[in-house]
Amino acid sequence: NGLPARCPTAREFQSEERSEERRDAEPFLRNAPCCSITGWCGLGMQHCDCSGCIDYRRVHRSQRSHVVGHPLTRYETQVVLHRNSANSQAKVSESSAEHPPTVSRFESSFAVLCSLSCFLCILLVRRYVPGASKHWLCRTPHICVGSLVLVTFLQCGLSVWRYSQPGADAAPFQETPVEAEAALEALPTTAAVEAEVDSAEDSGDSPSPSEIPSDWPCGEVLTPVDFGAKGDGHHDDSSAVWAAIAHGIRCNSTVLLGPRRHRFLVMPNVLEVTAENLIIVFEAQLVGPTLEAWNPTLESWPKGSCAYAEAHCQRSGGQSPEFARSQWSLLFLRNCRNMTLVGRSEGTHLEGGLLAPGNSFWRVRNTKPQVRGYCLLKLDSCEDMRISKLQLHDSPMYQVVVARSHEVELNGLRITLSNQALGDSGAHNTDGVNILNSSRVTLRRSVIESGDDNVVVKEGSSDIFAESLQLRRGKGVSIGSLGEREAEGQEVTNVLFRDISSDHCVHGVRIKTWKGARGLVQNATFERFRVADVMVGILIDQTYCPPSQRPEGCASEDATAAIRIQQVRFRDFSGTFQQMDRKVLCSACDDVTYENIALRPAGPAIPQRAGSVYRFSR
């Protein structure tokens, strides 16, 4: 397409001389020295001869070091062309008056050489000419003064002579055709651009999508940096990231969340994306805000949602409170079709993804679960989605949520937590992968750490397949909880988990349902599990009622009602446990089988402190 590469951004060129970005950029500036108005370099007319293009071959040496060393970002260039084209000539003259040209290196060197020569001549005259030392010019105190005055006059004289020559007012461009001069003069001065960019920096805000020109050309991969993002993890880059995504949606082109080693701070629920046939590539990381920055007053979940710690919440039938718990998320994909999210990887190392300062939430929510938190990635009402090689770290709540979606593939995820504790002091409600009311979801070859369920399949889900997972800490694989507050659609069917390793988790597999609930768990298979030092290998609990979700308890519920559990198979379990190999509290189970369960004690049993393991689980 005639576009060999993009021009380097200012941040890339300001990086260290031997950095990867600088090495990648310099060959293109030599081989394709023209930049289009959108920041792509090449040798075609769209790069060199268009209105607003920059031809680095024609830039005067005194300006080239600035242009090449600190090129404008594509957003800055667009701002220049769209906001300042009407008065650019006036700004050029003002800048020329305020910032006169400087003396070149040759002129400065020549002046210094002349000064040294005069100084040497004075010394020779004083030494070899009789009586010369009595002359005022050769007296020692006046030698330095005379040399300094001479250098100053020489520099000033050379500058006046150079810029008084005919055609000097045409600088900084030499031998430029009339057409190219007109295009170049349409650009405002660098000082004007820097002033505008500095003004934007002082405001602390990235440009909003409404400020992005509507005629921004398609056909190019743009990053949030091109729309003014700082990428330092401290300034709010929500608008710039959204602008890059919006550009990709409008142009049906790939969205690049980069460059590498950048962190874009975004606010929950700002990035609500609805798109089709879109690819989002994560080279950098989206970073969420701290609890103090996002919810400084510790606001609770909406009243009546029954999400957490809402005693005597009046809610019966309809959807369960589970849908309200993922109300806020850092990246929210809604009603999307045929989308791909992929992270950058080098071997087994993943770079791009989403992260948050989860610890600022956990230390509060462990004792106040009613305080709001947000998830990292949520899919709602999506279809034909592919997510691979993403890194997710320290979510305040659920890491990945797949809700009301179909045909979703999750592959090669790496989900981690910095908090190593479990129980009351751990990172509560941080499910790794949360599947809710979805079908035909596959999860493969992923590493998942959690302070709660590593992988959980909840109400309304069917045809769920997971294999080759490494689960660390957390509470293992779970189905449920089902039946909270007499909710409808409490069914999970056709589930297969196989080839799962579970290290230091609370459970290997758990099925949990609420007291007094109605629903169904059917045709679920768990096979080839390798567990290490889990508390309980297999748990079926039909008396589930955590106080974090129901502070008043469940004593009033109908004890005869229960979720039906049938056609559930546990096969080929091996490894070690701390408390027991299986625990079954089942009142409505039928056709539940255990085959080749070879679990052995890891050592002396650890007494279970009341509420330490199950208090905050779901």
Image: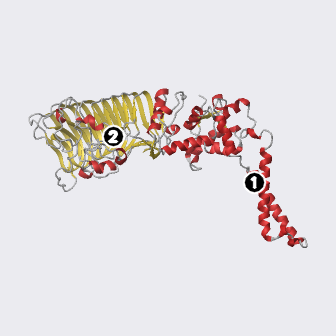
In the foreground, 296 or 46:
296
Residue 329, visible in the rendered structure = yes
Any mark on residue 375, and which?
A: 2
Residue topped by disc 1? 108
Q: In the displayed structure, does residue 511 sit left or right of residue 114?
A: left
In the foreground, 98 or 115:
98
- Identified at 26% across, 52% down, the residue is 425
Return the disc, 1 or 2, that comes first in the chain's sequence. 1
The N terminus lies in quadrant? top right
Q: In the displayed structure, does residue 122 sit left or right of residue 173?
A: right
Q: CA distance from mark 1 to mark 2?
A: 61 Å
Q: In the displayed structure, does residue 145 sit left or right of residue 338?
A: right
Q: Amino acid at mark 2?
A: Cys
Identify whether 420 is placed above or below 63: below
Identify whether 232 is placed above or below 305: below
Mark 2, other Cα within 10 Å: few <14 / some 14–19 / many ≥20: many
Residue 112, visible in the rendered structure = no
Classify mark 1: helix, strand or loop. helix
